Image (cartoon, rainbow, N blue to C red):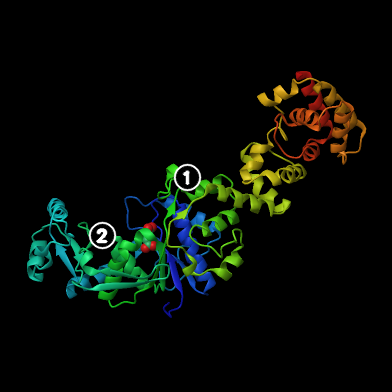
Amino acid sequence: MTNDRPVRVRFAPSPTGMLHIGGARTALFNWAFARSNGGKFILRIEDTDTERNSDESLQSILESMKWLGLDWDEGPQAEGDFGPYYQSQRVDMYQAAIEKGMGEGWLYRCFATADELESQREEARSNKVNWQHDARWRELSANESQAKADAGDAFVIRFRVPVGECVVIKDHIRGEVKFASDEVEDWVAVRSNGMPTYNFVCAIDDSEMQISHVIRGEEHLVNTPKQVMLCQALDMPVPDFAHVPLILGSDGKKLSKRTGDTALGDYIKSGHPDDALFNFLCLLGFAIDDKTTVFSRDELLQNFELKKISKGGALFDTDKLNWICGEYIRNTSVDDLCTAVAPFMVAAGYQLAPELLAKLVTALQPRANLYSHFSEQAAGLVSEVTYDEKAKKELSKEGVLQYLELVAAQLQDGEWPPTDFFDLVKQIASDNEVGVGKVMKPLRCALTGALGGPELADVLNILGREQSISRLAKAGQLV
Ligand code: GLU
């Protein structure tokens, strides 16, 4: 079930805010569909809302898409044969369609006021019937309509929805979806200020740009019959559709700020690896099969099919995201990690020599899920040690001073970095007839200031001989 037109898909954000998780996932599915079918991925900027548009939003959307590796073939900063790619620059095209629609009668002026419409809607609700349109204006002759407009009466332009028809759309996720035209009201195509509406311009652009498949959020399904009817009225090709499921937060409701960050930029700032977030976004409604969670871009493209996208809501599972991020961190080379982590270190105020950064990254790699975890956990390793309450308590236990001195003495003269460090700790524990933990725990606290942390052998390697011994001595004074 597909059309045989060359694959051309588009992502059509409105630059009225940051790129959100839902938008990023829609963009990603469009990109994947284009790339896995040898098609074109188009970026169209829906900037008709002049009050809410901002250049800052536009730039952040472009940056977020680049960060995710979603390169576009046509759109801003890219040439193309179907431009302009900003709706604000396409008004002549919309105007031509308005004139055509008025001339052919599938658009008409509606002079009803907002209050009138509300009371009609209210009446329809109480009679439990669908409100559709105000027949007075729908049936007004072209001459009378023109005369009222000339007299300065305010109006909107509505689309004359055909009576008694069935609109069938091809949806690659939901199958054939049918809409009775009688359930669709005569929708507003042009506002009273002369600005065409989203449904009007979107359908025209999709047709003009020869979009073969419209892949977008499920919340747009209600718009689809309107857009299809407009294409039919204009005698323009109708694209196929794929309405991707809503993303649900931990409360089972549509993802919102309350149940998690929704702006992609927040995930970038908090140090999520780009490939990991890309992987996670794919899983919001799509699966390669029932067992593969971590996959590369190539694997995605080899396996991407619209029919593998689920109809049901996709749960945004933060634990899964963290786990996937950890998997990517563990599978990244130390060199690449150092490059990724360096800006986070600088932001946290650490200026580390490359060698020290590499040691730190190696030590923390098994325990970090985000790039920012490296800078968060660097405290105490590459800066002055401070002892937290648990560490102080541990260091105040009986016998601790003696253990610290014994270890310090061994570290003084032995090989560096020590390869048999654990054996040394075991030996001290057995000589003193205590469990290994009794020596290990205060040792860790003395060296790092906290009970948790990376492997002690790595800690010694980061600190170096002198610093390790001086920390053991410093902690000894606390005892
Ligand atoms: N500008 C619309 C939005 O951001 C695009 C919807 C569509 O893809 O048709 O929701």
Q: Of helix, strand and loop, which one carries label 2?
A: loop
Mark 2 crowdedness (10 Å alpha carbons): few <14, some 14-19, many ≥20: some
Q: Position of residue 449 (x, y in %)?
A: 71, 29
Q: Horizontal placement of 39 versus 433: left or right?
A: left
Quadrant location, the N terminus? bottom left
Q: Is residue 345 left or right of residue 183?
A: right
Q: Quadrant of residue 202?
A: bottom left
Q: Amino acid at mark 2?
A: Met
Residue drawn at x 43%, y 44% as measured from the top left:
257
> What residue does disc 1 label?
260
Image: 324 above or below 437: below
Image position of 50 (left or right of 315): left
Instruction: Identify the residue at horizontal 10%, vertical 68% (top origin).
Output: 139
What kind of residue is marked 1?
A: Gly
- Judged from the image, the secondary structure of the residue bearing numbered disc 1 is loop
Residue at numbered disc 2 = 195
Label 2 close to label 1 by CB (< 8 Å) = no
Residue 396 lies in quadrant: top right
Q: Is residue 140 above or below residue 390?
A: below
Say if 27 sits above or below 386 in the image: below
Which badge, 2 or 1, is on the more N-terminal residue?
2
Q: Residue at x 47, y 45 (%)?
A: 260
User: x%, y% of residue 429?
Assistant: 85, 29
Marks 2 and 1, how far apart in space? 35 Å
Q: Is 17 located above or below residue 440 in the figure?
A: below
Residue 91 is at least partly visible in this image: no
Q: Position of residue 158 (x, y in %)?
A: 20, 64
Quadrant placement of the C terminus: top right
